[in-house]
Amino acid sequence: MEDVLSAALPQAAIAPRRLHQAMRYAVLGGGKRIRPLLAFAAGELAGAGPDRIAVVAAAVELIHAYSLVHDDLPCMDDDVLRRGKPTCHVEYDEATALLAGDGLQTLAFQLLTERPLSDDPAVQLEMVKLLAVASGSRGMAGGQAIDLDSVGKPLSLPELEFMHIHKTGALIRASVQLGALCGQGLGEGEMERLLHFAKCIGLAFQVVDDILDAESTTATLGKTAGKDADANKPTYVTIMGASAARAFAAELHADALTALQPFGARAERLRQIADFVVKREF
């Protein structure tokens, strides 16, 4: 995936050099690549070719990377560490980081239109729409807006879940859906099962993130530990407590695996990713 992303990004020597350097800095050399992994696993289940899946995997990872660059800006979370190195605006400057995020976002959609990703052009057009919705005000950007508006406010568990279904979950669901759409076409019931799996894993990912933020060190996480608590943000740990949050993550994990049962061995990679998401320590 690192090779795919490196090839997709503008080379650092191409003008404007500083902007392209910042884009590459924000994407390469770090990250768990959960979203590309999910795209590949769902695509494999649907019988998709790896060359097609690689394109959508890169697109969702570019959207994710752009969101991290913007989230770290002083006007949002104001963080100085990401993936074990200075955040983009610290390494470069705020204006360059803002433009780097813009460039990564638009590059993601360029990738989805440059080569055939489905035998049906209408399906490929739907893929572009899916990523746009998942990234926009009804998806990731909307979830971030809710997050910023929730600082210092008491949220109920359903309100917190609604926020993270958008902020974190939307792009994770899109990763699974886009990977699957590169294949031969799943039945409606099969796609619904995949999307239910993705919804559970998206929430579980955030629950575990909240637990790790509360209990791990900055060196382990590669980003500032305890940042949410310091910013007085509502999390699954602050609302439920750490023990209940762990139990909730385990429940989501079990629900996700149940959704995959009808697929049998075809879904083994998705099961492995689900295990990693819930049991990871960084």
Image: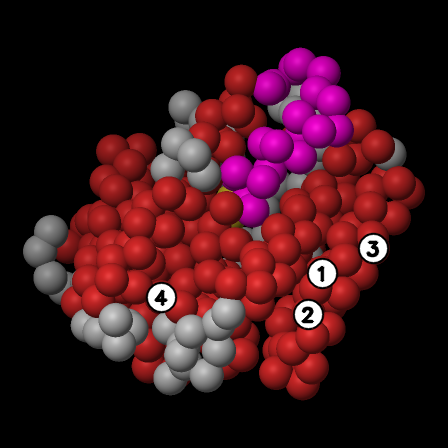
Is 20 on the left-hand or right-hand side of 159? left
Q: Tell me the residue that label 3 is attached to.
A: 250
Q: Tell me the residue that label 1 is attached to.
A: 256
User: How far across and how far down the image is residue 26, in percent?
Assistant: 37, 53
Q: In the figure, 50 relative to 12: above or below?
A: below
Q: Earlier in the sequence, mark 2 or mark 3?
A: 3
The amino acid sitting under disc 2 is Leu
Crowding near the residue tagged with mark 3, few <14, some 14–19, many ≥20 C-alpha atoms within 10 Å:
some
Q: Tell me the residue that label 2 is attached to.
A: 260
Q: Distance between the residues labelled 2 and 4?
A: 22 Å
Q: How far apart are marks 3 and 4 (CA)?
A: 29 Å
Q: Is the C terminus in the top left, top right, bottom left or bottom right quadrant?
A: bottom right
Q: Earlier in the sequence, mark 4 or mark 1?
A: 4
User: How far across and how far down the image is residue 256, in percent?
Assistant: 71, 60
Observer-nearest of 23 and 189: 189
The residue most toward the left is 15
Q: Distance between the residues labelled 3 and 1?
A: 10 Å
Residue at (30% x, 64% y) in the render: 123
The label nearer to you, 2 versus 4, is 2
Residues in magenta, as a range = 150-169
Crowding near the residue tagged with mark 4, few <14, some 14–19, many ≥20 C-alpha atoms within 10 Å:
many
Q: Which of marks 3 and 1 is nearer the N terminus?
A: 3
Residue at (69% x, 75% y) in the render: 262
> What predominant SS class does the magenta segment belong to?
helix
Determine the secondary structure under disc 2: helix
User: How far across and how far down the image is residue 115, in percent?
Assistant: 19, 72
The amino acid sitting under disc 4 is Val
Residue at (46% x, 83% y) in the render: 47
Q: Which of marks 3 and 4 is nearer the N terminus?
A: 4
Is 163 on the left-hand or right-hand side of 108? right
